[in-house]
Every structure is written in structure tokens, then in C-alpha cells.
Image (cartoon, coloured by chain):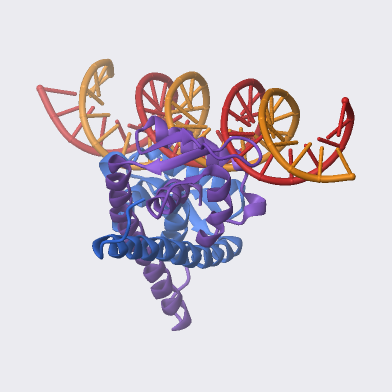
Chain colours: A blue, B purple, C red, D orange
Amino acid sequence: MMSFLEPCLLLMLQRGEAHGYALLDALAEFGFEPEFLDPSLVYRALREMEAAGLVSSKWSAQSLGPQRRLYRISQKGNRSLEEWAAELHQTRAEIDRLLQAYESVKKHYAEGGDAA
Amino acid sequence: MMSFLEPCLLLMLQRGEAHGYALLDALAEFGFEPEFLDPSLVYRALREMEAAGLVSSKWSAQSLGPQRRLYRISQKGNRSLEEWAAELHQTRAEIDRLLQAYESVKKHYAEGGDAA
DNA sequence: GGCTCTATTGACTATTAGTCTATAGAAGCG
DNA sequence: CGCTTCTATAGACTAATAGTCAATAGAGCC
């Protein structure tokens, strides 16, 4: 699941800039359950992506509570997301292959095939 | 990719008992490229699955080269594989969600939406 | 009898994920 | 006004996973 964290964040940033805490909440959309997702993981992912040049950040001028770090996706980040999408297509194909193989073994069983 | 290793091994064992080296070769079927897959990973996975009771092993009587450890899937292993399959269905659904969200942002862009 | 091939194992390192705690500023409130 | 609470970010430490490399060991082959 964590391997989806970075692409999910990038994707959300592609829809508009945002700060960590807001992204944390919004991750529910992708199946992350907020109560089981430690904020540290999100912040760390954002810092790492910034170090990798996928996003940039600035302190937001507004205030209402503590300072917020506003993240914005970079061109490099956009490209990276595209690569991610391609990889995810592949991963999905591999999962399909596995599931199909599993179904066919089950069917073989059901038809009275010799068990292993 | 490695997270698929154990279910792939279990699946292959469901089709019949086998030893580590043979499984290693056969993994190509699931997209593992033999030249990039260190044998240690396969053997370790097998030992861990045995410790977890998912498979059992015995030294094979035959010979031709060094002794082989023949693995066979257990009932617990069969159940575990079934659970795996269910999880993979979920993972697949999550990937779909991500890819669909990505496509829809791209489309939004293409239609001249305001970039982030 | 030294070499090579198949097969398995172990030790060590690196990378990734997870948990828990600390800081810090603004707001709310008696 | 000084204490608490809430939002937001950051850091340090630990645990789990994955990856690399070398060691062992038996059988067949010249």
C-alpha cells in the first residue's frame, strides 16, 4: 500500500497545490484509512519528493494555526507520475496473470484433477 | 514485485511438488526475469513459508547432482493462497482507482483546465 | 583428484516502512 | 495573561523487507 503513497500524493498535487495535512486527509479517496496512516509517512514522502525535485514547496502567507508548507508539483513530478502510471499498468497486468493462473488451477481441482 | 513472490511459489506448488531451483526457473512465467532474481530470495521465501506452515519439505530420494529439497503445499498454504487472491483483487481495484483518477486529471488538462 | 555444474544455505548490507516523541504557532478561555 | 488545545511539521529511533555475496556440498566429467 505504501508503494502507492507517492503517486497518490503527486496525483493530488496535479489537481492543485496543497499542504501536508490536507493531503493526509484527502488520501482516504485512495483507500488509505486516515486513522491508520501516520502523518510522518506523508511528510517524509513529501520531503523526499522535494529532494528528488518532483515537487517544490513554500511557506504559505496566510495564517490560521501554525505555518503551512504549500507543495506544488514540478514538471519533473508530472513526468514521474506518467512513468508511475505506466508501471502501474504493468503491475496490474502481472496481478491479472497471477489471478488467472490461480483460477485455472482451482478449476482443474474442481474437475477432479490430481492434487499436488 | 517481491511481494508477489510468495503467492507465485504457492501457486506453482499447488500444481505439484517441486524443489527450489526448478521453481526459480519457472518463475519466469510470472514476469520474474531469472537473471535478475537471486536464488537466495526464492530459498528464503520457501524456508519462511515452511516456518509458517504453508508448505512442507523433504529431501528427495532420487539423485543426480546434489540433494534436492522437495516442497509440497499444505492445507494451510492453500487457504493462505485463497486469501492472497482476495487481497490481490483489492490491490487491483486500488490500482484501477489511481489510474482512473490519473486519466481524468490528464483529460482535464487536455481540455484546458487550469494547471496546478 | 581437480574442475564444473546444480542446489541449498548463511551472513551481511541496504532500503523501506512504522512508531513514537518533540516542536511550534495560533486560538480559545477562564 | 498564562494555560490548554488544535493544527501542522519534523526528527529520531526501531522493525521489517529486500538485495548482495560468498560458502558449502555432492555428483559427474575429464
At a point 44% along the width and 35% down the height, the residue shown is B57
Is A21 left or right of B65, judged from the image as shown? left
At a point 28% along the width and 49% down the height, the residue shown is B83
Q: Position of residue A81 (x, y in %)?
A: 52, 63
At a point 58% along the width and 66% down the height, the residue shown is A79
- Whether residue A60 appears in this view of the structure is no
* Vertical side of A54 occupied by B74: above or below: above
- Whether residue A101 appears in this view of the structure is yes
Q: Quadrant of residue B20?
A: top right
Is D23 left or right of A31, judged from the image as shown? right
Q: Nearer the viewer, residue B110 or A32?
A: A32
Number of dots carrying numbers = 0
Q: Position of residue A114 (x, y in %)?
A: 32, 57
Q: Position of residue A106 (x, y in %)?
A: 29, 60
Q: Nearer the viewer, residue A39 or D9?
A: A39
Q: Nearer the viewer, residue A1 or B29?
A: B29
At a point 48% along the width and 71% down the height, the residue shown is B115
Q: Position of residue A63 (x, y in %)?
A: 37, 45
* Vertical side of A88 occupied by B72: above or below: above
* Vertical side of A89 occupied by D8: above or below: above
